[in-house]
Amino acid sequence: MNPEVLISMLAELDRIRELTVDLVERSAPRLLPAPPDGDGGAERTTFDLLLGARRAVLGNPAAARTLHDLLVAEGHRYAETPAGAQLRDALIASDAVENLRRVWETVSLNVLDGPSPPNAAPNAWAELLADAVIGHGLDDSVLARLRPEGFA
Amino acid sequence: MTLTDPRAALADESNFISYLVGLAGVARVVHALAADGDCPADPPRDDDDFVHVLLGLASLGAAIEGLTETTLAQSNSPIEALLPTSTNARWLR
């Protein structure tokens, strides 16, 4: 198998991955909420940005986790410098950071947190998708009463 | 186009400088976020992974800003003469 064939195979696998993400989103409609009413404007732009961020994370969990870990490691290094330590203390005290944290947790559904095998999708990602897809299939009235609000 | 047949013209469409500008912009947003709240949090908060992700972005932005400062320091021209009209053009210098 020559390199050209291998690269073609990688391209095809990526196309299949993208199509699979589409299917998962259709199977779990709560992952793909309806856009806001209206023809556009700032609200629609924000919605598209946040949905794009969610799709980037859910569709590429291993890469997203790797990038996340690299940024966290760089953040730890920066925090050891005087400028970084000062910025860290200011970020911790900032209410805007708390608001941004809520936005990020809502968008990412926390799939990048927790344990993760090296160079693989984090466990929370697999658990969320299983919950979203399987939970949707079992969404009867009895189970719905047992499911806390906010869970798929 | 294949990897063995690159086209030089595609280099003109490279977004690499825009990536750097975008990262520097995000880093400035992190500093703006830090400026929102001068009083200690109640209850006190911890510096978790989310805070360190923001710190990592700020660190990258500082490194990128450092690249331009190096360029300016090496130049013999007055700084005013280097100030361009657009942000992208500034980084390209």
Image (cartoon, coloured by chain):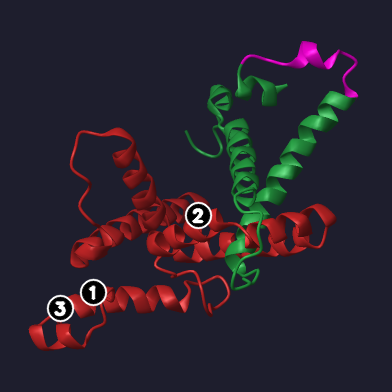
Q: Is residue A130 left or right of residue A62?
A: left
Could you tell me which quadrant the C terminus of chain A lies in?
A: bottom left
Local crowd size for mark 1, using a 10 Å CA cut-off: few (<14), some (14–19), many (≥20): some
Residue B84 drawn in magenta: yes
Chain of the residue under the numbered disc 2 shown in the image: A
Location of mark 2 (residue): A2
Calculate the distance from the C-alpha at mark 3 to the C-alpha at mark 2.
Answer: 43 Å
Which residues fall within the magenta stretch?
B74-85
Chain of the residue under the numbered disc 3 shown in the image: A
In the image shown, does A41 or A30 lie closer to the viewer?
A: A41
Name which residue type carries label 2.
Answer: Asn
Q: Choose the circle earlier in sequence order: 3 or 2.
A: 2
Q: Residue at x 64, y 48 (%)?
A: B35
Say the numbered circle drawn on residue A133.
1
Location of mark 3 (residue): A137
Name which residue type carries label 1.
Answer: Val
Q: Position of residue B24 (x, y in %)?
A: 64, 39
Q: Residue at x 20, y 88 (%)?
A: A146
In the image shown, does A9 or A132 lie closer to the viewer?
A: A132
In the image shown, does B17 or A112 lie closer to the viewer?
A: A112
**Chain painted in red in the figure:** A
